[in-house]
Every structure is written in C-alpha cells, then in structure tokens.
Amino acid sequence: MTLSPTLPDRVRSLLRRRPSVVWRRFLASGLALLAALTAFWPDVGHPAVVASRDLPPGVPLADSDLRLVSFETPVSGSFPGVSDLVGRTLTEAARAGVPLTDLDLAPATPDSASVAVEVADQGLAGVVRPGSRVDVVTSTGEVLAENAAVRETRGQVVVLTLPRLDANRVAAMSLDHALAVTLR
C-alpha cells in the first residue's frame, strides 16, 4: 500500500491506524499532568477587601473585620490587601460582603479633621453629595477653605473633611455667620 500524494489522504490514512501502546500511554500521562496543573492554577479574579460582618462608622478596622474576596471584574477604588485597611475608620456603615472602597474611608492623614457646616442655601445643600469637592465661603465673600471633601449630607448640614487649621476656622466662623459652599 502506498501513500497518496495529497495531504487529506495522508491524514485519513494515519487516522485509520490504531495508535501504539506507547503513544496512548504518553497521551494519557500528558492529560493527567494537564489536569493536575489546572487544579492548582491560580484564580484570575480581581481581589478586593470586603467587610466580614456589618460594621458601624467611626470605629477603627481590625483584621477580623475584613476579608479578601476575588471578583470577576475589578472594583473601582478597592484595596488589594487587608493590611491596607487595618486601623483606618469608615465614614459610613458597611454591610457584610460589600467591597470597601476609598470613598468609604476617613482620610488617613492625622492633620485633617471633619466639621459640620449648616449651608445657608437650602437648594445647594440638596445638590451636594458625599465625595463632592467644595469651597467654603462667608457671606462677605471670604474663602475659608478650598477643595474640602464632602463626607456626609443631612438636610442643610454638610460634613466636610479638610486640613485641621481650616476646619477650626470654618467651625469658629459657622458659630456667628452663615456659610455657603461652592461646588468645584
């Protein structure tokens, strides 16, 4: 029997033959090795730190409050390791299993403080949202603080996080004067 000169005929002829014992054992061991390797293949997900239980705001986070979970898609603003969050405090309550992001945390710097400001313009207070950046202005037009981060809003009261010196000045001025905030 001679082999046909065309490639499809050659392939058909080789496929008709029964594979040798050595070839079958080689193929079986290769498949077993592939199965063993895929069992230990690392997860290709995106790690993010989540709350291990419901957490209240303002309490420093401990290692037992957090756990690392892998998500199929990346979580914007999340942290890849538990050690990044230990000792930090939450600005709002967090539910168990929900990823913690940079917006959920109080600033890590000790030279910043938060101050509650009653905004004179009720309409503007409804527009300001947590995470917004604002400037604090007096009724005379004096700028008390620039680029303050909004932590929380409750009606006409806006809680701002800013450098400690600016926070002290804003708190003192808010006792006697109506203050306004301008959105950035």
Image (spheres, rainbow, N blue to C red):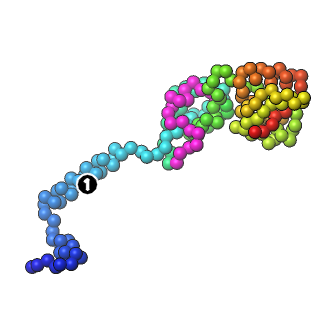
Residue placed under numbered mark 1 in the picture: 31
Q: Is residue 121 left or right of residue 28?
A: right
Q: Main secondary structure of the magenta part?
A: loop
Residue 95 in the image: x percent, y percent? 61, 37
Q: Is residue 26 left or right of residue 86?
A: left
Quarter holding residue 152: top right
Which residue is found at the position 29% from the left and 51% from the top? Answer: 35
Residue 145 in the image: x percent, y percent? 77, 28
Q: Specify the segment rendered in magenta.
A: 73-90
User: Does the magenta run of residues contain 85?
Assistant: yes
Q: Does residue 132 appear in the picture of this structure?
A: yes
Mark 1 element type: helix
Residue closest to the far left: 1
User: Does the magenta run of residues contain 23?
Assistant: no
Q: Does residue 12 appear in the picture of this structure?
A: no
Which residue is found at the position 21% from the left and 78% from the top? Answer: 6
Quarter holding residue 90: top right
Residue situated in front as seen by the camera: 1 or 166? 166
68 lies above or below 15: above
Quarter holding residue 88: top right
Q: Is residue 164 left or right of residue 83?
A: right
In the image, what residue type sits under mark 1?
A: Leu
Residue 121 in the image: x percent, y percent? 87, 37
Residue situated in front as seen by the camera: 104 or 143? 143
